[in-house]
Amino acid sequence: MLIGELSRRTSVNAHQLRYYEAQGLLEPERGANGYREYGNDAVVTVGQIRRLLEAGLSTEEIEFLLPCATGAAPELMPCDDVLEMLRSRLRGLDDHIDILERSRRTLLDFIDATERQASPYVLSGACDNA
C-alpha cells in the first residue's frame, strides 16, 4: 500500500509516517516508480509506535523496543535489556513527577501567602510592579 493508504488506515498523517521512516521505525519498500510501498504489517507497526509514544518513550527507545513488540497492543517479549530500559524510563518519569509535585506545592504556598496579605487594592489587579 502507498503512504496515503497507510495514513488513512492508521489515522496518522503522511508527514508523521515519513518521520517514523527517517527515525528507522518504518521500513517501506520502494516501487519501480520510487514510491514508498508498505506491507500490511505496517498498520500494526504504526499502531505499536503510537502506543509506545503514548507511554512517553522516545523514538530511539521505540527503535530499540520494536523488534520485541508483538500484536497491536503491543506486548513486549522479554528481549535483552527491555525490562531494564522500561524500568529506567519509569524511574525517570517518577522523578519528574516528584519535581512537579514539589513545584506545585511551592506555588500553592506562594499563592496562599500572597492571598493572606492581599489588600483590596492588590486583588483588584491594580498593583503596578513598574
Image (cartoon, rainbow, N blue to C red):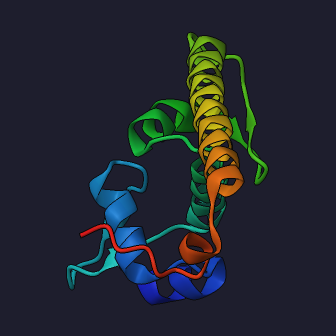
- The quadrant holding residue 91 is top right
In the drawing, does residue 2 fall left or right of residue 107? left
Residue at image coords 57%, 10%: 80
Q: Position of residue 128 (x, y in %)?
A: 35, 74
Residue at image coords 46%, 30%: 64
In the drawing, does residue 11 fall left or right of residue 77? left
Q: Position of residue 43 (x, y in %)?
A: 62, 67
Q: Front-most of 86 and 112?
A: 112
Classify the position of the C terminus by image quarter: bottom left
In the drawing, does residue 68 fall left or right of residue 76? left
Residue 95 seen in render:
yes
Q: Is residue 50 above or below residue 76?
A: below
Q: Position of residue 51 (x, y in %)?
A: 67, 53
- The quadrant holding residue 102 is top right
Residue 37 seen in render:
no
- The quadrant holding residue 42 is bottom right
Q: Is residue 13 above or below residue 93?
A: below
Q: Front-most of 55 and 4?
A: 55
